[in-house]
Image: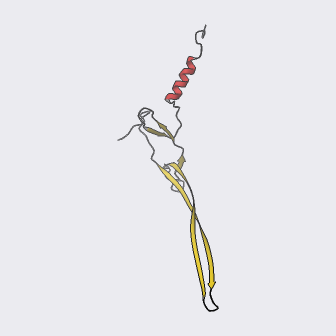
């Protein structure tokens, strides 16, 4: 028994898929040491030495990430059973905000694009067309 239907075409067959996330974070710490030494002597026997050490650490963080949509392989042979990467096309409804994902690109038009297209169509003089 099918539990869902495609919102666009009413189709009943779906392949399972999943997202694969690849994230790399590299941290490059650098330590800086500053040493100040000062000495004082009031006579030949007593020497007063002051040593001040200050350390500061700076971290450079480099991160990168990618997300892939993978279709689960339908191969029975475990040696050729590799999941394949598929590009996902996302479309957001301007009326309700519903986001639809497709593995094939669809021909869509926004409200702004429709308005511009209609304005362009109305600028043509169609009165002499077909005469």
| Residue 115 x/y as whole percent | 52, 24
Q: Quadrant of the C terminus?
A: top right
| Residue 77 x/y as whole percent | 51, 54
Residue 30 occupies which quadrant of the picture? bottom right
| Residue 107 x/y as whole percent | 53, 32
Whether residue 32 is situated above or below residue 11 in the rendered picture: below
Residue 12 occupies which quadrant of the picture? top left
**Of 60 and 119, the residue lying toward us:** 60
| Residue 13 x/y as whole percent | 43, 40
Q: Residue at x 57, y 72 (%)?
A: 54
Whether residue 58 is situated above or below residue 112 in the rendered picture: below
Q: Residue at x 53, y 49 (%)?
A: 84
Whether residue 40 is situated above or below residue 11 in the rendered picture: below
Residue lying furthest top: 131
**Of 74 and 55, the residue lying toward us:** 55
In this rendering, would 40 be left or right of 94? Answer: right
Whether residue 116 is situated above or below residue 105 in the rendered picture: above
Q: Quadrant of the N terminus?
A: top left
Residue lying furthest front: 42
**Of 108 and 46, the residue lying toward us:** 46
């Amino acid at each position: 028994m099918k539990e869902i239907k495609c919102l666009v075409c009413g189709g009943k067959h779906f392949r399972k898929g999943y997202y694969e996330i690849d994230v790399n974070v590299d941290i490059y710490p650098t330590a800086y040491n500053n040493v100040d030494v000062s000495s004082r002597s009031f006579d030949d026997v007593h020497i007063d030495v002051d040593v001040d050490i200050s350390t500061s650490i700076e971290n450079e963080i480099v991160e990168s990430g990618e997300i892939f949509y993978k279709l689960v392989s339908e191969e029975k042979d475990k040696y050729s059973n590799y999941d394949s990467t598929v590009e996902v096309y996302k479309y957001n409804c301007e009326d309700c905000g519903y986001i639809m994902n497709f593995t094939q690109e669809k021909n869509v038009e926004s409200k702004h694009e429709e308005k511009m297209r209609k304005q362009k169509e109305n600028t043509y003089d169609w009165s002499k067309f077909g005469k």
